[in-house]
């Protein structure tokens, strides 16, 4: 009888320890919150840990195109431009995502989408007029707002790499015009991060 009681007590103790440890790891995982910038880069540019959590939104080929050195520089500059226009944007995005407010997330992403579209259009114009790298670099130096934005052009031997980045950005969730697909992508983001 004593032996059975000790076995029972051991099983209960091991089970309790296991459940407590499991709850602690779940709590730690929930405590991991991404910054607004990380959420934005992950959702719009498939970059970072957030981008890896959204395979329903980005296919592998698009993820690869959006994770090049040039694409990351482009994303960093877009983030800087958004901060310049709205210093609270990324804090508001983070709050909206973690409060599961898909409508607010959509509203914020539409606002950011306008900034991204302006930058993509500027990049398209530069890429289209690119006869040689040195001429484009000279144009960029003379363009006050975009001089730093397109600094990576000096590392690109041809316009091809820049065009690939632009084409990849054109089909990211921020550029989706179909409301159903856009809502599904936003819902996926909110669900994956909560």
Image (cartoon, rainbow, N blue to C red):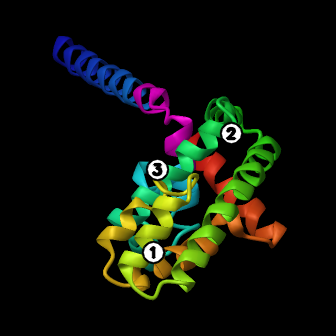
Q: Residues within 10 Å of mark 3 (few under 14, many from 20)?
A: some
Instruction: Answer yes or no: is residue 46 visible.
Output: no
Q: Nearer the viewer, mark 2 or mark 3?
A: 2
Q: Nearer the viewer, residue 64 or 84?
A: 84
Residue farthest along the bottom direction in this orientation: 131
Task: Name the element at disc 2.
Answer: helix
Q: Is residue 88 magenta?
A: no
Residue 86 % position (x, y): 69, 35
Residue farthest along the top direction in this orientation: 2
Q: Nearer the viewer, residue 30 or 73?
A: 73
Q: Is residue 34 magenta?
A: yes
| Contact (Cβ within 8 Å) of mark 3 with mark 1 | no
Seen at 49% across and 43% down, the residue is 38
Task: Name the element at disc 1.
Answer: helix
The residue carrying mark 3 is 76
Q: Nearer the viewer, mark 1 or mark 2?
A: 1
The Cα atoms of the two marked residues, 1 and 2, are separated by 26 Å
Seen at 71% across and 35% down, the residue is 96
Q: Looking at the picture, does residue 72 appear above or below residue 160? A: above
| Contact (Cβ within 8 Å) of mark 2 with mark 3 | no
Q: Main secondary structure of the magenta part?
A: helix
Residue farthest along the left direction in this orientation: 3
The Cα atoms of the two marked residues, 2 and 3, are separated by 14 Å
Label annotation for residue 136: 1
Q: Nearer the viewer, mark 3 or mark 1?
A: 1
Seen at 46% across and 60% down, the residue is 141
| Contact (Cβ within 8 Å) of mark 1 with mark 2 | no
Residue 40 % position (x, y): 57, 48
Label annotation for residue 85: 2
Q: Residues within 10 Å of mark 1 (few under 14, many from 20)?
A: some
């Amino acid at each position: 009888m004593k032996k059975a009681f000790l076995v029972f007590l051991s099983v209960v103790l091991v089970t309790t320890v296991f459940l407590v440890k499991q709850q602690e790891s779940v709590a730690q995982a929930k405590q991991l919150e991404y910054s607004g910038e990380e959420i934005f880069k992950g959702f719009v540019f498939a970059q970072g840990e957030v981008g890896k959590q959204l395979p329903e939104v980005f296919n592998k080929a698009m993820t690869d195109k959006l994770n090049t050195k040039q694409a990351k520089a482009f994303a960093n500059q877009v983030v800087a431009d958004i901060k310049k226009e709205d210093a609270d944007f990324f804090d508001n995005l983070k709050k909206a995502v973690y409060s599961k407010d898909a409508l607010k997330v959509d509203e914020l992403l539409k606002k950011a989408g306008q900034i991204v579209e302006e930058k993509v259009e500027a990049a398209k114009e530069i890429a289209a007029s690119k006869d040689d790298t040195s001429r484009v670099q000279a144009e960029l130096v003379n363009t006050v707002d975009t001089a730093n934005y397109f600094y990576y052009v000096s590392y690109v031997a041809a316009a091809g790499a820049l065009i690939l980045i632009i084409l990849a950005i054109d089909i990211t969730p921020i550029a989706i015009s179909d409301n159903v697909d856009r809502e599904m992508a936003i819902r996926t983001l909110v669900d994956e991060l909560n």
